[in-house]
Amino acid sequence: MTAKRPRPPATDPHAPRELLNLAHLLVFVRVAQHGSAMRAAETLYRAQSAVTRSIHELEGALGVPLFERHPSGMLPTPTGRTVLERAQRVFGELETLATWCATRQQERRVNAPRGVPSSLLNTRRLQLLVELARHRHMPSAARALGISQPAVSSAIRVLETGAGFELFHRSARGLQPTPDGEIFVLHVRRALNELRHVPDDVAALQGTIRGHVLVGALPLGRTLILPAAVAHLSKAYPGVRVITDESAYETLAVGLRAGDIDFILGAVREPDPASGLVTEPLMSEPMAVLARPGHPLAGVRNLKLKQLSDMQWVLPRSHSPSREILDALFERSRLAPPVPAVETADLAMIRGLLLQSDMVAALSAHQMQYECEMGQLAVLDVPMPDTVRDIGFTMRAFAEPSPAARKLIDAIREVVAQFNPLGYAGRAVA
């Protein structure tokens, strides 16, 4: 047997980490459902001693008893009930995947078998799949998990045999997930992300909030709201690590649907009903036009939009919601939308351009609140009607956040309740 290679340090939030044994967790679910190791053994076609051993190993991994043992049977402890709720989410995702795979095989049609096949009950095998889909390069996936390349190949063959179709296209340039493979990996990522929350759920019942929270941080949420909430969370719960991802909304939404990202904070967009995402507006704010204090129009009262038409503009990217709102404002005023000198969503870039030129930028004023408070930038006195955008959460429907994510969500709500940037009222949502 090939010796395991040393695993690199997990500096990446998506780096593989030790997760619970899925086979042990399934045994736990069956014992909880039947109230007896003997009855669970019958349904699993395993010896009762093997079932008992799986329960002991799971309890050892979590460091707590999950059952009360009585002559009449086994009842989940309060901790066991919490683990059961999360475990049912894990296996619900894997059962959905198994059913979908069965319908993809012509000989089975819609008569899908119930339950989770053995090919999906190996935690490390599923982690290998996710790493391979992420790196799209077998040696890199092997290095990420500290195993040999043949072990990766073997694991993928088992999964493809169980699925009944190819998960990857092989070529000289590497591996590319097939369309069906993309869907397969999505379900696996969701299941593994639910699985990683189990120890944190147990720790929370013992009074310890820990783990990491990965936030999709959009511009409207990451300037003031998120820093204030994270500062509060870190003081109250120093064992929590917060990681932010500043990617574009479309990229963040993909990670959110897979469970890699806990939630998105920023300007909310109306999600496609089929996306599985929901939004929760917290407040709203209009756009404003900002410039340096020495700008020729700074301090001029009652400016008209037409007076800004010939300015050099720093604008959001084409087709972004903010850009569409601004273009619509000019069109309602029967003016041609401004042609940008620069298109960017990077606040550092916007700040530098405004400070060093007579350019103007349209964005929510609180994104530059610190600069405005220190007198580095000024809000031009021009009306911006119908440019209000909702700021809030985008989350996965029916998902159950980790204890740490719930605490950060609560902290954000508290910050927003006290938030009133630059005198704008903002619409608070209960």
Image (cartoon, grey):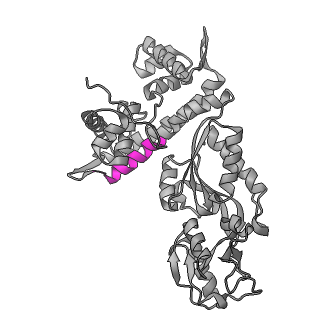
Left or right: residue 186 versus residue 205 is left
Q: Could one spot residue 34 in this view of the protein?
A: yes
- Can you give x and y, in whole percent of width and height, for residue 176 in the image? 30, 52
Residue 180 falls within the magenta-colored stretch: yes
Q: Residue at horizontal 54%, vertical 66%?
A: 346
Q: Is residue 44 above or below residue 131?
A: above
Q: Within the image, what quadrant is residue 200 found in? A: top right
Q: Is residue 377 above or below residue 161?
A: below
- Can you give x and y, in whole percent of width and height, for residue 154 in the image? 26, 34
Q: Quadrant of the N terminus?
A: top left
Q: Is residue 67 above or below residue 303?
A: above
In front of the other: 22 or 75:
22
Q: Residue at horizontal 72%, vertical 82%?
A: 383
Q: Within the image, what quadrant is residue 401 found in? A: top right
- Can you give x and y, in whole percent of width and height, for residue 11 in the image? 47, 41
Q: Residue at horizontal 36%, vertical 39%?
A: 144
In front of the other: 375 or 79:
375
Q: Which residues are magenta?
A: 175-191
- Can you give x and y, in whole percent of width and height, for residue 185 in the image? 39, 45
Q: Could one spot residue 400 in this view of the protein?
A: no
Q: Residue furthest left?
A: 172
Q: Residue at horizontal 40%, vertical 39%?
A: 98
Q: Is most of the magenta stretch helix, strand or loop?
A: helix
Residue 232 falls within the magenta-colored stretch: no
Left or right: residue 102 versus residue 275 is left
Q: Quadrant of the C terminus?
A: bottom right
How many discs mark residues in the rendered view? 0
